[in-house]
Image: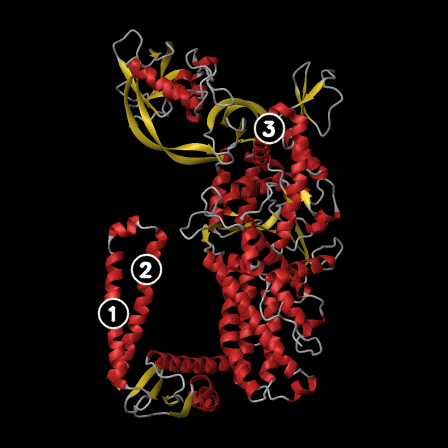
Amino acid sequence: MTNLPKIYDPQEIEGKWYKFWEEKRYFHAEVISDKPSYTIVIPPPNITGILHIGHALDNTLQDCLIRWHRMNGFNVLWIPGTDHAGIVTELIMERKLAEEGTSRKEIGREEFIKRMWLWKSESAGNIVSQLQQLGCSCDWERERFTMDDGLSKAVRTAFVKLYEQDLIYQDTYMVNWCPQCDTAVSNLEVEPIEIDGNFYHIRYPVVDSDIVLEIATTRPETMLGDTAVAVHPEDERYQRLIGKTVCLPLSNREVPIISDSFVDMEFGTGALKVTPAHDVNDYEIGLRHDLEQCVVFTSDGHMNENAGQEYSGLSRLKCREKVVEDLQKLDYLVKIVPHPHAVGHHDRCGAIVEPTISPQWFMNVKPLAQRAIEATKNGDVKFIPERETTRFLHWMENIEPWPISRQRWWGHRLPIWVCEVCQKSTAAMDTPVKCECGGTNLLQEEDVLDTWFSSGLWPFSTMGWPQKTDELQTFYPTSVLVTGWDILFFWVARMIMFGLACTDEVPFNTVYLHGLVADDKGQKMSKSKGNAIDPLETIQKYGTDAFRFALVNASTPIPYVPLPEAQIESGRRFTNKIWNAARFILMNLDKYPIRRENLDSMHENILEVNWIKSRLAQTINSATDALDNFRFHELAQTLYAFLWHEFCDWYLEFVKQRIANNQPYALWIAADVLEQTMRLLHPIMPFLTEEIWQQLPKDYDVIGTNIEPSVTVAEWPQSDVEDTIAEKTMSTLMNVIENIRSIRGELNVPNGATIDIHIQSPDPMVRNHLDSYLEQYLPAFTRVNDVVISESLPKPKASAEAVIGNLVIYIPLEGVIDLDEEKTRLSKRYQQIVKDIKAAQKTLENPQFVERAPEIVVQQKKDLLDRLSIEHDKLERSLAMLDNS
């Protein structure tokens, strides 16, 4: 007797089955195995406590691949773990400290680090729990953290190795500085955001002359650090001024007028203020002309003593206001022109980043990038979608030195020790006993490494590198990396470079870069925008499997994948549909238990049985091909179409008719199809499929894999030969049924009324195949009384008509409906639809509506027009049938 409750309640089954899988250790991979290896390392989520929608998509897609390969007999390893996420996590802790009325600097480094480890122990457990709720089949016995002892050793080893190859060095250079986080950040961590700024046109008087140069800038406060004015050497307007000096307004310092070909003669006035300490391009000009680098900002974004007594201590934005005010008072300000422009913001805290000169540790990644380029061009690494290859190569070919030091506390301290005697820096795994000069007092660098340094080692540090472990021997290089396209340069590129530099192998053979989850308007979901979906709330509301199905179904190969809530609701309806189908089959199997002798004695040449077997074979092939080529959305759509439309809407209706006639063979085949389909669906919907699969009867061998204890380790289905004749015949039969149902509905034929059908077809094969099936199926499916099929038939009086290829269906209507009354009803509706269509078209042709109305409102109006147009065409067809009857 079936144990499936009437209502599907995901909360009742999900925890039960995850515990079962863990107890059976299905997710654990053995280093010694005769199976081929398949490995994925999870993109480690930050220890910020809560997973977001991007994590849900990313890990669902990985789990699909992991479960599929497990069912295909691979020795599957999915390594989970978390990232310490330096700056991000520090900011969270700093906010907590502020709530307590203290700060990071007040409690000191040691206490701060202690608190960070406490936070990690709490939040990492939450993340594991959330991943398990999502159904992720990770090998939890191999969970890792980027600051574990083993991974920390890997970081030091890689650093020292690269340092000894002269690829890591210290230099004073132009970097992006975040005054809020008080640290240098890389170019990748700077997000350009357009703001409504201004161009400030300022007079720079030429010394010993009546000439005044007009110079425009968006950052007037930086003029306090100007050390030159540059013009183009070929600009005739200024050639006679090259070599002279100008008096810097407000500072009364003289700075030279220099010529440099970088200056754009066509931009602004063609004269450029040069601030080598606070602009990347000015820095390069300064190096070429040996200009002074005058730093005017403190590390926290205030003005220092170099800015002058009037401005020292002011915040940079307050200083801008005062500089503009003083320029106006002294008549140096010509005009202010509105100028929207992009300004770099730190992607972690949102503060405006300042380019500034700072001594930092850098990594020369050019040689490593070249190896990564060669590996990509050789096919050692394959990017999906293909367009990402071009983006990757362009970035790598133009890569710049990577500033790897951060002025923070939480993270891997640089394994650099500085001798107090000779000031020489030494890289070492542990504290050196003494320096080469003999000095014994060596102090470790205070800075920590950029988080992406340790993340870049993740594929092999998680397996015990630099030791030559069994895990590395068995599972490395990994098989595929699944992640969002937005961290291609942050993370993927660095993993490839580190993999080649440290192991002489690429860390993975395939990189699948999925889109970012977006809302209905195509905007990336984020908490700050207020448009984010909370995965845990969604799971509570809809169930994990419905949520996972919606994510997979949405995962088309585009940069931003929309996930409206309606799509998740659709996933829930799908789970309910499957549940109800399973209950129907299992309840009827109680009445008609399967016996081997029954199966052997049954005649198997039944149209709907041969058709569903063929459709299943094609579905298996399509599902396998979709997974093999990372077309996740096609996998979801293939299974949805088969299960909902073909299996439930059609085949089970045939089964009901067979059962009504005491013919259970089709039911038994339904059980077989259900079992195989649960295996196909398992990578997407692990909980629902396990619950149903476990309920299937085990005392017959139609379902060969029922000997397995769980669908998780059951074999992926293998397809049979497709039956093209059965598919063609059934397609025609289904078209006939659908057309008859459509005509009945459109012409308002009463539900209880029976009708006659006349079918004309010149094809003898069609006639022969259809004849018996029409007699057999049409009465039950369309309330047909009599069927006439012939090569040539006159059209009956007062009949409706439908054409399917060279097959014509006539439905006599006389005595079935009142033709005049129906014509009047349809005509009224037709006239109203025409008016509604004109109104909708007028609205959509109004440019003000299209431009000003919310995007979702515009789309709703377009959808309405589509629906009206479909109804218009149906009405037109129905009226034509009545006119010709």
Quarter occupied by residue 218: top left
> Which scheme is used to colour this image of the protein?
secondary structure
Label 1 residue SS: helix
* Residue corresponding to mark 3: 408
Mark 1 Cα within 10 Å, few/some/many (few <14, many 20+)?
A: few
Q: Give the vertical position of 171 relative to 583 (above or below).
A: above
Q: Residue at x 41, y 86 (%)?
A: 752
Tell me if I can see residue 400 in this picture.
Answer: yes
The answer to whether 379 appears left or right of 862 in the picture is: right
* Residue corresponding to mark 2: 862
Amino acid under disc 1: Gln
Which is more N-terminal, label 1 or label 2? 1
Q: Tell me whether circle 3 and circle 2 mark residues in contact (CB < 8 Å).
A: no
Label 3 residue SS: loop
Mark 2 Cα within 10 Å, few/some/many (few <14, many 20+)?
A: some
Residue closer to the observer: 440 or 521 = 521
Quarter occupied by residue 252: top left
Residue closer to the observer: 293 or 810 = 810
Tell me if I can see residue 72 in this picture.
Answer: no
Q: Nearer the viewer, mark 1 or mark 3?
A: 1
Q: How many marks?
A: 3
Label 2 residue SS: helix
Q: Nearer the viewer, mark 2 or mark 1?
A: 1
Amino acid under disc 2: Lys
Which is more N-terminal, label 3 or label 1? 3
Q: CA distance from mark 2 to mark 1?
A: 18 Å
What x and y, as percent, mark residue 737?
42, 82
* Residue corresponding to mark 1: 832
Residue closer to the observer: 625 or 252 = 252
